[in-house]
Amino acid sequence: MASIANADDGRRLETGDVVSALFPVHRPGGREQEGYRPAVVVGLPERVGTPRYGVLILSPMTTDRRQGWAEQSPALYPRYAAGTAGLRSPSLCLLDQTRTLDVGRVSRYRGRLSEEQYRPIRDGLRRILAEQDS
């Protein structure tokens, strides 16, 4: 599905694309991801309607150093090998840090996850966003 955003090479961004994006600095600081980093496009607001602004929903990534918190929650932090979709190092997708960013914060297209590689992200986000039965 197409997005209003274009990658630096002119292609339309889609869910499953890996991009480099600038996550803003927060004052006061918190635990949110900041700075330039790879991120996975996980949502396209225009699939639901016409957004007020050009935005994407992204899940940031960080280097996989076999962190204990990621080991304890693999469904929340899917792992990707170096070289996957243009990633320079082994990486974790931080589903708990998913957020909306202006398309102007996307600096470059890195690559695309296959359907099989994207599935853990999609499934994890569905579980995060699912309504709990009462």
Image (tube, rainbow, N blue to C red):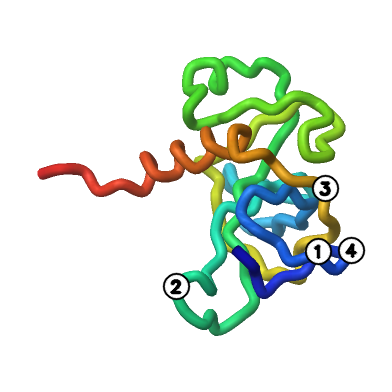
Q: CA distance from mark 3 to mark 2?
A: 26 Å
Q: How many marks?
A: 4
Which residue does the numbered mark 3 point to in the structure image?
Answer: 110
Secondary structure of residue under mark 2: loop
Depth check, front residue: 76 or 111: 111
Disc 4 to disc 2: CB gap under 8 Å: no
Amino acid bearing label 4: Asp
Secondary structure of residue under mark 3: strand
Amino acid bearing label 1: Ala
Q: CA distance from mark 2 to mark 1?
A: 21 Å
Q: CA distance from mark 3 to mark 4?
A: 10 Å
The answer to which quarter of the image holds residue 117 is top right
Disc 1 to disc 4: CB gap under 8 Å: yes
Residue 5 is situated, as x and y percent measured from the top left of the image, at: 71, 70
Of label 3 and label 1, which has the lower sequence position? 1
Q: CA distance from mark 1 to mark 4?
A: 5 Å
Q: Is residue 79 left or right of residue 104?
A: left
Q: Is residue 9 left or right of residue 33?
A: right
Amino acid bearing label 2: Val
| Residue drawn at point x = 53 percent, y = 39 percent | 121
Of label 4 and label 2, which has the lower sequence position? 4
Which residue does the numbered mark 1 point to in the structure image?
Answer: 7
User: Residue 48 got which mark?
Assistant: 2
